[in-house]
Amino acid sequence: MNRRTLMIGASAFGIAAFAGGAVYVNRQRTAEAEAAAATAAAAPATDETLLIRPHSPILGPADAPVTLVEFFDPSCEACRAFHPVVEALREEFPTELRVVLRYTPFHQGSDEAVRILETARMQGKFEHVMNALFEKQEEWALHDGPDMDKAWRVAGATGMDIAKGKSDRLLPDITAVLNQDVADLEALGVQQTPTFYLQGRKLVNVSFESLQADIRAAVSAAA
């Protein structure tokens, strides 16, 4: 066997090994997602009054058969990473899935970001502003201190009335929303963001793949 034959043989072996490895990884991810879904189904349901409040923002049909509650922080990098995954699931299940959002202001400046979102909601621009804050998060949620003036400008770029938003930001109703959400996350023991509850059950060890698998399984079960 000459050197060229050896090289070709080694190359073919490497390609086969890579392909085999890719199949293994995909199978492993699928198995992990299915295991996470089974764990979620076995977990005890949480008191819904702690998960969903009358003031909680709802994305999707209010009467959808599947409910995903997300405790999120506008400043959280992981929340930003999960955001397009949740949005894709909403597009995949436009009538079957509703997403209930709960504020979890763990980071410096996040309470002000919540006030931006709530004043945006008063102006009918909640989703636009939330999407913009996530998209531009790296510009305002700085590690050495948030630039909330920049966050307001990001919100204003969506067409939100910033002057009115700033005048409304300290309204008692908005403060009450913040206080209630903080009280609920403490009662539930939420310690990180994002934290998801599906059909009243807390999801654990959540990945993009496991969240997709859990939602799809829940929609199938509710059909």
Image (cartoon, rainbow, N blue to C red):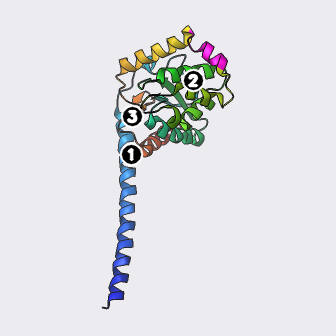
Q: Position of residue 115 (x, y in %)?
A: 54, 19
Q: Which residue is mark 1?
A: 34
Residue drawn at (47%, 40%) of the image:
81
Residue drawn at (51%, 28%) of the image:
147
Q: Nearer the viewer, residue 168 or 8?
A: 168
Local packing at callout 1 (Cα closer than 10 Å; few below 14, some 14-19, many 20+) is some
Q: Which residue is mark 3?
A: 203
Q: Quadrant of the N terminus?
A: bottom left
Q: Which residue is mark 2?
A: 117
Q: Callout 2, which amino acid? A: Leu
Q: How far is mark 1 from mark 2, CA to CA?
A: 35 Å
**Residue 61 visible somewhere in the drawing:** no
Q: Nearer the viewer, mark 1 or mark 2?
A: 2
Q: Is residue 34 above or below residue 107?
A: below
Q: Are marks 2 and 3 in contact (CB under 8 Å)?
A: no
Please provide the residue range marked out in magenta: 163-171
Q: Is residue 200 above or below residue 77?
A: above
Local packing at callout 3 (Cα closer than 10 Å; few below 14, some 14-19, many 20+) is many
164 inside magenta stretch: yes
